[in-house]
Each structure stands twice: as C-alpha cells, then as structure tokens.
Image (tube, rainbow, N blue to C red):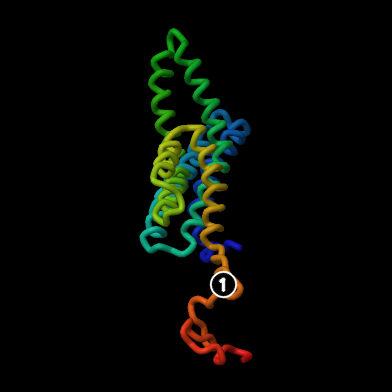
Amino acid sequence: MESTRHPLRWIAPIAYVASLDGFLVLVGLASTFDPDSTGMFDAGFAVLSFCVLAAFVASVVQCIVLYAKKADDRLAFSRRAMLLAKLGLIPFFCLGGLIMMFLLLLSLHPVLAVVGWMSVPIAMTVGWITMMGGSLWAIAYAGGLRAERRISTGECVAHIILQLFFFADVVDAIVLFVRGRKRERDAAAPPPPPAAPPIGSTPYPYQPGYPTPYAPQENLPGK
C-alpha cells in the first residue's frame, strides 16, 4: 500500500486549493459586510491572495526538490497532489466561469464595452496561471513516468499539452491518475518465478547435487 513518508509535504498543495476556494467563502460573506465599508473584504482578499502566491511558489519549489533528489515516493505523491489540485479547484473555476460570463455580457454594453473587453484577457490570464498550479504536478508526474520508461515519449508529450488547456486538464489528470497508478503497481509487482524444467531434461542452471550432462548416472540424487 502506498504511503507518503513526509506528511508536511501536503501543506503547499492543500494550502493552494484551500486559499483559492476561500475566495468563494469571501464572496459569500461579502453580502454580510457593511456596505459603507469595504475594509473587511479588501483585507480578506489581500490575505487570500498572499496565501495563494506563497502556496504556488512553495509547490513549484517542492516539485523541483522532489525530482531533483529523486525521492522514493515522488511519483505517488505527485499523482495524488495532481488529483487534489484538479478536483479541488473545480468550485473556484466555476466561480471564475460565472465572472467570465459577466465580463462577456459587459463587453456587449454600449458604454462599458471597453471595460469588459479589457477585463476578459486579464481574467483568462489569471485563470490560466491558477490552473498551472495544479498542472505542474501533472506535468512532473508524466515526466517522471517517462523517465522510468513506464509511458512512451508521445504519451508524455500528449499529457503535457493537455495540461495547458482548460477542461482538458481535468479529464487528462483523471486519466493520468488511473493509468499511472496501474503502471506503478505493475512495476512494483514481483517478477514471476522461473518456469520449471521439463521432466527428464537436465536442470538449468546446474544446481548443487545435480551432475553435469557428462556425469555418471550413479551420482544422481537418490541413486
């Protein structure tokens, strides 16, 4: 059974997902704030933004260190962190999708169209960078499987490309999780025992107590 030797490794991936999903809680609580004061909302937004940035940098550094040191459990940890980030960020990207729809509708307004069209590229860039916080684990995992010759180069490249696009990254992460786990288990399984020699044939390789083909028959065990 797989185990993660250092539980503290989970701090960065969990903090990254929790901080981003915390924006949903902040938006939900915004209706309870004093409308005349935006101080609490601004403070909460600043704290969450700092946590997201810190967790993102920590995840990148941690990923590099794991594979640079060739940690024994780097593949299993990367696979789990990948799925945690991809599935855990679904609520955040649902909120982001609603914001994108609002900006697209705003771009159709005769007066506020400029604001909408200027905001759409910025929102897409922020969303893409956020997505890469989970994709980095998927890319590292695919590269690790390829380095150990458990997947082909073409498959590795395909996974990396899919991790650069919205929606496709989540589907690819699930496929990579299932496929990679099977490859890891196959590699960890013990090799099958050697086949027994046919009856009447000379044992190979020669074992203690058995003669070479040129030894006299009286030296056989039991003779």
Residue 33: tell me if it is visible.
no
168 over 195 or under it: above or below: above
Residue designated by label 1: 197
In percent of the image, x 52 and y 42: which residue is there? 173
- Whether residue 176 appears in this view of the structure is yes
**Which quadrant does the C terminus fall into?**
bottom right
Residue closer to the observer: 220 or 130? 220
> Depth check: 159 or 200 in front?
200
Q: Nearer the viewer, residue 157 or 124?
A: 157
- Report the residue that reaches farthest toward the left: 68
Q: Position of residue 86 (x, y in %)?
A: 53, 42
- The kind of secondary structure element at disc 1 is loop
Q: Where residue 101 sits: x, y (%)?
A: 52, 21
39, above or below 152, in the image? above
Q: Amino acid at mark 1?
A: Pro
| Disc 1 packing (10 Å; few <14; some 14–19; many ≥20) | few
Identify whether 10 is placed above or below 31: below
Q: Quadrant of the N terminus?
A: bottom right
* Place of residue 213 in the rendered image (x, y in percent of width and height, measured from the top left): 48, 81
Horizontal and vertical percent position of residue 91? 58, 36
